[in-house]
Image (tube, rainbow, N blue to C red):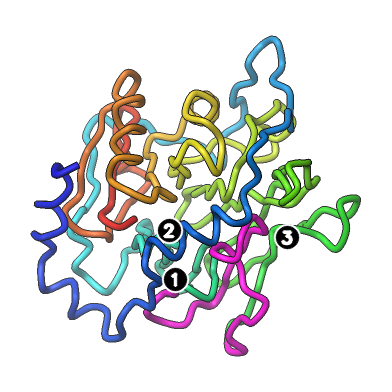
Amino acid sequence: MSGLAPHFRKMPTVLAALVALPFVVFPISRLAAFERVQAPAPKPEINKPEINKPEMKENCPGLVASNRPRIIPAALRLALASDQVRFTYVGHSTFLIESPQLVRIATDYNDYVRTPILPDIVTMNHAHTSHFTDRPDAGIRHVLRGWGPTPDQPARHDITLKDVRVRNVPTNIRDWRGGTERHGNSIFIYELANMCIAHLGHLHHTLNQQQLNEIGRVDVVFVPVDGNMTLDLDGMVEVLQALKAPLMIPMHYFSTYTLHRFLERVRQNWTVEMSEIPSMVVSKTGLPATPKVTVLPGY
């Protein structure tokens, strides 16, 4: 567990100058408590895997071959080139995504973990109160909830703001009684700078072929790695293998033990890299030549 400590201590002070306002975060123990209270003990069979494992077929919008990765880990420049995206891990399941035209998106926007600046678009999932809020800031232009008014009416979003398109693919989640809430979660897809970034939300089951086809081939995926509140580790690895994203970013872990348990599992399949700061700038042509898991400091 001590392996992450140096990375947290080494965060350059220059990053702080980029973010004038402080992160509004909730203590990790409090966040975990919210999920423990609401998480049921049994895990019903929400989406039975197919005999033949589904896999990605279509590109979203299409991968560019690369022999030399050009990820910019420091992310120290405020201005982005037209082919670059900046994302910053704020905490829990919340990332700040910034486009070249300065459209700002907050994932799993909630009352406890907030981005330091007001986003233009927020996406939310219905699993727990650490993933959504009923009181979003009135200044947010687009508030996208990942669940519909009834289980028979799933949320369907497809919006465009400047150089950003956001859409969703509904999935099921466990409800508080241990049953299934149909279409209670969404995988949100953010298309910008010729890249597709997927946020798996509070995913509770593996993906079928129809869902994978809807998602399309993604370049970056934000993946919950707790292995308990969301999908178990083997199931999550199966999802990642099906998505085939070149860059995978862990989120939704409550301790370094939980994180390292996931990392030990995925080292069987992919390279693991530890970042010293919570922000990075990525371009399509700079994606890893072979799939990589990059850990941004946070929790």
Residue named by callout 2: 92
Q: Count residues near mark 2 (Cα–Cα under 10 Å), then give few for <14, some for 14-19, many for 20+.
A: many
Residue 119, visible in the rendered structure: yes
Task: Name the outermost residue toward the bottom.
Answer: 138
Between the C-alphas of marks 1 and 3, the distance is 23 Å
Q: Under tag 3, what secondary structure?
A: loop
Amino acid residing under circle 1? Val
First in residue order: circle 2 vs circle 3: 2
Residue depicted at x 57% and y 50%: 201
Range of magenta residues = 113-139
User: As displayed, is residue 109 above or below residue 282?
Assistant: below
Identify the disc placed on residue 70: none
x then y, percent, for residue 53: 63, 16
User: As displayed, is residue 155 above or below residue 161?
Assistant: above
Q: Count residues near mark 1 (Cα–Cα under 10 Å), then give few for <14, some for 14-19, many for 20+.
A: many
First in residue order: circle 1 vs circle 3: 1
Horizontal side of 80 relative to 72 (left or right) equals right
Task: Name the outermost residue toward the top.
Answer: 51
Q: Under tag 1, what secondary structure?
A: loop
x then y, percent, for residue 74: 17, 59
x then y, percent, for residue 235: 54, 26
Q: Quadrant of the N terminus?
A: top left
Residue named by callout 1: 113
Q: Under tag 2, what secondary structure?
A: loop
